[in-house]
């Protein structure tokens, strides 16, 4: 049986993040939104913060999220992708993000107990 060291785990994690960064953000968004919706629907410990994040990143949204708490709850790849989206907020990617999330908007609001 091979034992994995903490250093090997950290190196693998860094490698995966580098691979993620090398994939264009536009290509990562559809899979990320589907993953986040799946987490919300799974009603896990992170579901509420994922629903908050999905809604808060929509253009012209007044929905707020505690980014520090979300960072703590989120997968590092999810956090990296959303962080990059925040950095590209003034270009067309945010509108593509909205187009991906909009079909789930009512479901997310209902999950959070918010009237639309």
Image (spheres, rainbow, N blue to C red):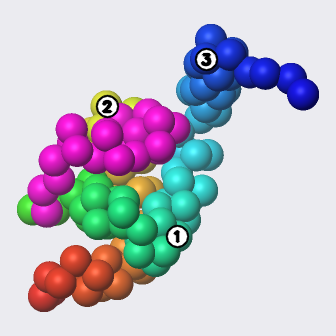
Using the rendered view, name the quadrant where residue 104 is placed.
bottom left
Q: Residues within 10 Å of mark 1 (few under 14, many from 20)?
A: some
The residue wearing badge 2 is 87
- Please identify the quadrant where the N terminus is shown: top right
Q: Which residues are magenta?
A: 63-83
The residue wearing badge 1 is 38
Q: Residues within 10 Å of mark 3 (few under 14, many from 20)?
A: few
Which dot marks residue 98? none
Sooner in the amino-acid sequence: mark 2 or mark 1: 1
In the displayed orientation, state which residue is furthest to the right: 1
Q: Position of residue 15 (x, y in %)?
A: 66, 20
The residue wearing badge 3 is 6
**From this viewpoint, is residue 66 visible?**
yes
**Element class at badge 1:** helix
Between residues 31 and 99, which one lies in front from this camera angle? 31
> How far is mark 3 from mark 2, CA to CA?
31 Å
């Amino acid at each position: 049986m091979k034992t994995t060291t903490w250093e090997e785990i950290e190196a693998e994690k860094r490698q995966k993040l580098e691979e993620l960064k090398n994939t264009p953000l536009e290509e990562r968004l559809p899979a990320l939104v589907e993953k986040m919706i799946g987490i919300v629907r799974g009603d896990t410990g992170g579901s509420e913060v994922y629903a908050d994040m999905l809604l808060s990143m929509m253009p012209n949204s007044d929905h707020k999220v505690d980014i520090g708490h979300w960072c703590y709850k989120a997968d590092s790849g999810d956090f990296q992708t959303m962080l990059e989206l925040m950095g590209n907020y003034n270009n067309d990617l945010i509108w593509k993000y909205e187009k991906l999330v909009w079909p789930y908007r009512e479901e997310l609001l209902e999950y959070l107990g918010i009237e639309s």
